Image (spheres, rainbow, N blue to C red):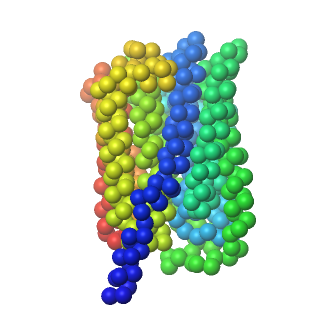
């Protein structure tokens, strides 16, 4: 009875204000991040052939991100388990190996005939885009290393709940990208796709280096050895890290595959390049709102349930409010002039493109609810040490996306960019239901 009373008191100790203090800097940083992506779109819209530039950059960078995605897996592991130097360094050594492999894969795409096969036969790109795609891949050789720096720094900041530094790093990233976007399109000799990747890499590199400073200071204060080992197996060896993190790497890789898979399906529609460009703009626009919950729900769940499972109801309530608010914001943008204003004045597309984006944006309006459900239960599985169901769910997500996008492209080739938003939503629905099933099964 005494234990029950103590647990009830602990449950009440978590306030809405405490969650907000952790969440708001992350939400601000997320908005800055997606805003930085739209800086690239705006810069490319000023090039002589904006549709080709957007399509080439979208296809090439999506493959580079797919290959680099596993370099973020270490962050999920770090924020879930310990906070000591031995654990951190052991995980970091493993992630260095992952980064090296990712750089090799991008090198193969950039400098061998494999890249041409992937771009034309799998990515669905036209031959006239191939030169620009290769340029993007060559610049992207450093992308896995940049990912490693960002994820390593952020893992320390999230573990210490110093989320304000994440916001500061993202803010400086945006400043750098805006500066480059102002003058790079004026330079002769740079293709549109090259401008896009240079702006993106410079911004991401700035974010990683800025976040590294406070992360290093905080890391020095950590214990050398674990003083509070979790009940689950402590990954003190490279083999243990591999066992725990492999499903998370699969998750990152699968999510990276979703973009080129979607673009490959959209490329098979009538007016494929226009469909890809429209989908990318619509996706980036809606992510201006969706980033308010993306990853943040998972971080909140881990941060507050890690030490006290009795906070579960508070986290669920906060996450539900956040997801419904985001859905409402997207719907308002669709049915009012706000959406067209943001598309034409913030993202920088013309009115015809803004009108074409309406249908995919409307479908995306309900995606935040699915995303929140998936992230909450994924976080609970992470805390339980059950990573295999997470990887399994992501694989089925990608399968569902592939089946949906290629089926629609074959049956309704004139459906356009909305095909992509439908496919992405179907995939997330499948994944959310699966992770919830396993979370209930393992009593996470």
Residue 185: where, in percent of width, then height? 65, 18
Rendered position, 334 above or below 218: above
- The residue shown at (59%, 51%) is 164
Q: Quadrant of residue 200?
A: top right
**Given the current orientation, which residue lies at the most extreme left position?**
411
Relative side of 301 to 152, left or right: left
Residue 102: where, in percent of width, then height? 63, 47
Locate the N terminus by quadrant.
bottom left
Q: Quadrant of residue 177?
A: top right
Q: Nearer the viewer, residue 299 or 250?
A: 299
**Given the current orientation, which residue lies at the most extreme bottom position?**
1
- The residue shown at (36%, 87%) is 2
Residue 7: where, in percent of width, then height? 38, 78
Residue 368 at least partly seen: yes
Rendered position, 323 above or below 417: below
**Given the current orientation, which residue lies at the most extreme top position?**
48
Relative side of 290 to 181, left or right: left
Q: Nearer the viewer, residue 38 or 116?
A: 38
């Amino acid at each position: 009875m005494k234990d029950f009373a103590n647990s009830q008191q602990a449950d009440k100790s978590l306030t809405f204000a405490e969650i907000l203090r952790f969440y708001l800097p992350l939400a601000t940083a997320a908005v800055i991040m997606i805003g930085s992506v739209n800086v690239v779109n705006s810069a490319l819209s000023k090039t002589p052939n904006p549709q080709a530039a957007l399509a080439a950059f979208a296809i090439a960078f999506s493959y580079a991100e797919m290959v680099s995605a596993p370099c973020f897996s270490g962050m999920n592991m770090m924020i879930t388990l310990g906070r000591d130097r031995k654990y951190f360094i052991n995980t970091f050594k493993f992630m260095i190996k992952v980064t090296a492999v990712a750089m090799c894969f991008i090198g193969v795409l950039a400098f061998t005939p494999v890249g041409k096969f992937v771009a034309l036969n799998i990515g669905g790109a036209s031959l006239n885009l191939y030169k620009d795609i290769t340029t993007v891949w060559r610049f992207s050789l450093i992308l896995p290393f940049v990912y490693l720096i960002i994820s390593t720094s952020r893992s320390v900041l999230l573990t210490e709940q110093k989320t304000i530094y994440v916001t500061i790093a993202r803010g400086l990233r945006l400043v750098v990208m805006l500066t480059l976007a102002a003058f790079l399109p004026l330079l002769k000799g740079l293709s549109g796709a090259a401008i896009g990747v240079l702006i993106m890499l410079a911004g991401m590199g700035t974010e990683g280096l800025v976040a590294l400073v406070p992360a290093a200071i905080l890391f020095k204060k950590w214990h050398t050895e674990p003083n509070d080992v979790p009940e689950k197996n402590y990954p003190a060896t490279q083999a243990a890290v591999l066992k725990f993190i492999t499903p998370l790497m699969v998750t990152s890789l699968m999510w990276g595959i979703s973009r080129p898979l979607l673009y490959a399906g959209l490329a098979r529609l009538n007016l494929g390049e226009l469909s890809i460009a429209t989908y990318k703009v619509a996706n980036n626009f809606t992510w201006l709102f969706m980033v308010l919950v993306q990853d943040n729900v998972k971080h909140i769940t881990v941060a507050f349930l890690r030490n006290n499972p009795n906070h579960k109801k508070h986290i669920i309530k906060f996450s539900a409010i956040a997801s419904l608010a985001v859905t409402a914001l997207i719907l308002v943008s669709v049915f009012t002039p706000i959406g067209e204003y943001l598309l034409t004045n913030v993202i920088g597309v013309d009115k015809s493109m803004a009108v074409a984006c309406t249908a995919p944006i409307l479908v995306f309006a309900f995606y935040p609810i699915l995303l929140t459900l998936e992230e909450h239960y994924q976080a609970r599985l992470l805390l339980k040490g059950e990573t295999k169901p997470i990887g399994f769910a992501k694989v089925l997500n990608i399968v569902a996306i592939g089946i949906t996008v290629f089926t629609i492209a074959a049956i309704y080739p004139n459906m356009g960019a909305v095909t992509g938003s439908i496919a992405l939503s179907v995939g997330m629905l499948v994944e959310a239901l699966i992770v919830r099933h396993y979370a209930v099964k393992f009593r996470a």
